[in-house]
Amino acid sequence: MSSKNKDSITKSQKTEQTSQDTDVVASREGDVNFLDQTLRPTIWKDYIGQKNIKDNLQILLTAAAQRKHPPEHLLFYGPPGLGKTTLAHLIAKETRAQLKATSGPAIEKVGDLASILTNLSPGDILFIDEIHRLNKAIEEVLYPAMESGSLDIIIGKGPSARTIQLDLPPFTLIAATTRIALLSAPLRSRFSGGVFKLEFYTNEEIEEIIHRSAKILKVDIETEAKTEIAKRSRFTPRTANYLLKRSRDLAQVRESKLSKETVMEALNLLGIDEVGLNATDRALLTVIEEKFNGGPVGLNTLAAALSEEQATIEDVYEPYLLQLGFIERTSRGRTITERAKQHLKLKNPNKLL
């Protein structure tokens, strides 16, 4: 076969492959599995809320760009769904850097981390989600990589063991965690770019997010419907987008507009009440009130009564209940507040006196 024919076949194969890749990308845009990715902001002006963090990051990134250095290492923490991963992707786009993402549980051995770090290119961003779940031995290897850009590897065992130091390209580590207290102090101190806490959003900010998401989903939503979703979204964008999608589904099936009535019907079907509590939230409050006379009750006892993990109660349910002022943490355990009792009376008028 001639060289010209080979080139022709190669070009044809590349064209076919490119066409297939384009089809895959196009199909993913409408695929529900990639819908959350589609709703994620891709430019700074679309990222609503967290103004103080955005202002600090823009100064840090601008200064780093002027010095022609990668940004310093960053740590984001806060409850799930507030935008930690989104911020990492936005920083990568702003700096035009390649982002390589992994998570703490995925890095099981020192060799896993070494493989990731040695495959980085200059200026790359390494994003580690749930970094508090890193093994302590792996943390020790991460320290010199963050501080001096070197990787110390021990080869062999016993008297014949020796240490090899590998130089790493300049990179930025961005980490996210929902439980910053589980990070060791030495690791936290090495995030020289800053440690930023993401706060819960206001209802006004959530309404802006819903408005933007509805445009992307090509859904015509009424103002009162946006307000109703925002009230029940637990001050969290991820939850707001979830409730918007489920309300859209009901409107589509009923062939109706996305009105306040449609939203209320959809959220009632999901068991989400007027302040955003679900069935488990209400069960937690009811157990404290009815079985333990309003508390205090220890976390271990409460978890057993609800058949839930202690970590699930602490990380998933308690933050929002504390934010609403429905429970209190005391030295003796959890207690229910008068505000929560009033809410339970409204929801279950025949259960409580």
Image: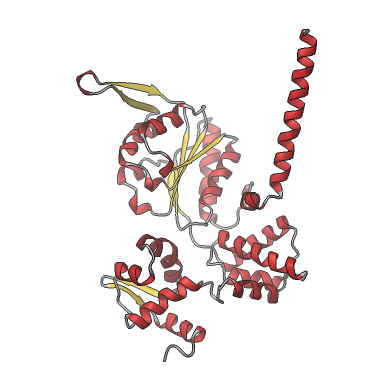
What coloring was used for the rendering? secondary structure
- Asked if one can make out residue 45 in the rendered structure from this viewpoint, the answer is no
Percent of width and height locating residue 35: 65, 52
Q: Quadrant of the N terminus?
A: top right
Name the one closer to the observer, 323 or 288. Answer: 288
Question: Compared to 121, does 265 lie above or below?
Answer: below
Image quadrant holding the C terminus, namely bottom left
- 222 above or below 33? below
**Position of residue 190 measured from the top left corner of the image (x, y, whole percent):** 36, 40
Q: Residue at x 75, y 71 (%)?
A: 254
Residue 162 in which image quadrant:
top left
Does residue 80 sit above or below 246 in this rendering? Answer: above
Of 313 and 220, nearer the camera is 313
- Say whether residue 246 is left or right of residue 291: right
Q: Position of residue 242 (x, y in %)?
A: 60, 61
Residue drawn at (32%, 83%) of the image = 293
Q: Is residue 141 above or below residue 129?
A: above
Q: Position of residue 95 (x, y in %)?
A: 58, 37
Q: Is residue 7 left or right of residue 194?
A: right
Q: Residue furthest top?
A: 2
Number of callouts: 0
- Can see residue 145? yes
User: For the view shown, which residue lies furthest in the left direction?
Assistant: 159
